[in-house]
């Protein structure tokens, strides 16, 4: 039995299994650093706030996207995720971010670059996470 399914086979097999979005967790040694990156730089807002609790966390939202931020030094040392945010206006995003928070521009992709696979991309990073901004 093959473990690979064609697109039509997978669609038929899993048609009742529907998902609406993927919501990642990101762990920081200091959650304030994550808030600076996601709220100040990228414009996310805090939808749920337990930042001042004994186990600080919050849920951030922007344009139908959500992300959980946690303050947990042990997990922060184990996890350094990379995400892609797809946009239809990469030049506008780049202009805002490069002027307001140039310290977050990734040294390996600090300008909008046309990639071999056809997407325009630039990247941001802080001490915990890398975000590739992408336009197709």
Image: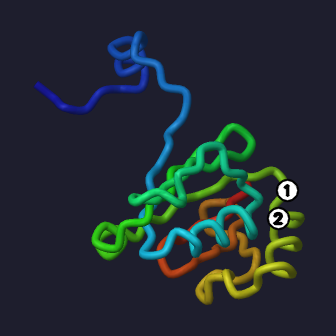
Asked if residue 103 lies left or right of residue 90, the reply is left
Q: Is residue 24 above or below residue 118?
A: above
Residue 10 lies in quadrant: top left
Query: Which one is in front, 87 or 30?
Result: 30
Q: Is residue 93 left or right of residue 123?
A: right
Query: In this rendering, would 15 be left or right of 92?
Result: left
Label 2 close to label 1 by CB (< 8 Å): yes
Vertical position of residue 124 compared to residue 17: above or below: below
Residue 43: which disc?
A: none
Which residue has dot 1 on it? 89
- Give the image location of residue 69, x and y in percent: 50, 57
Q: Position of residue 73 (x, y in %)?
A: 34, 73
Rendering colour mode:
rainbow
Locate residue 16 relative to residue 51 in the image: left or right. Answer: left
- Is disc 1 surrounded by few (<14), some (14 to 19) or many (20+) residues within 10 Å? few
Q: Residues within 10 Å of mark 2 (few under 14, many from 20)?
A: some
> Helix, strand or loop at disc 2?
helix
Residue occupied by mark 2: 93
For the image, the number of numbered tags is: 2
- Distance from label 2 to label 1 (Cα)? 6 Å
Pinpoint residue 42: horizontal percent, then vertical percent: 73, 63
Quarter of the image where one finds residue 94: bottom right
Q: Image quarter for residue 28?
A: bottom left
| Residue drawn at the location 31% of the way across and 67% of the way down | 75
Tell me the residue at 72%/46% (across/down). 62
x 85%, y 56%: residue: 89
SS type, badge 1: loop
């Amino acid at each position: 039995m093959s473990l690979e399914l064609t697109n039509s086979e997978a669609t038929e097999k899993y048609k009742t299994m529907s998902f609406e979005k993927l919501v990642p967790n990101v762990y920081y040694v200091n959650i304030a650093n994550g808030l600076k990156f996601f709220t100040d730089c990228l414009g996310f807002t805090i939808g749920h706030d337990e930042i001042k609790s004994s186990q600080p966390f919050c849920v951030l939202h922007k344009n139908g996207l959500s992300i959980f931020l946690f303050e947990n030094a042990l997990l922060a040392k184990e996890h350094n995720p990379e995400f892609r945010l797809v946009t239809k206006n990469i030049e506008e995003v780049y202009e805002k971010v490069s002027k307001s928070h140039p310290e977050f521009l990734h040294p390996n992709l600090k300008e909008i670059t046309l990639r071999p696979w056809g997407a325009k991309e630039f990247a941001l990073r802080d001490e915990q996470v890398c975000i590739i901004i992408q336009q197709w």
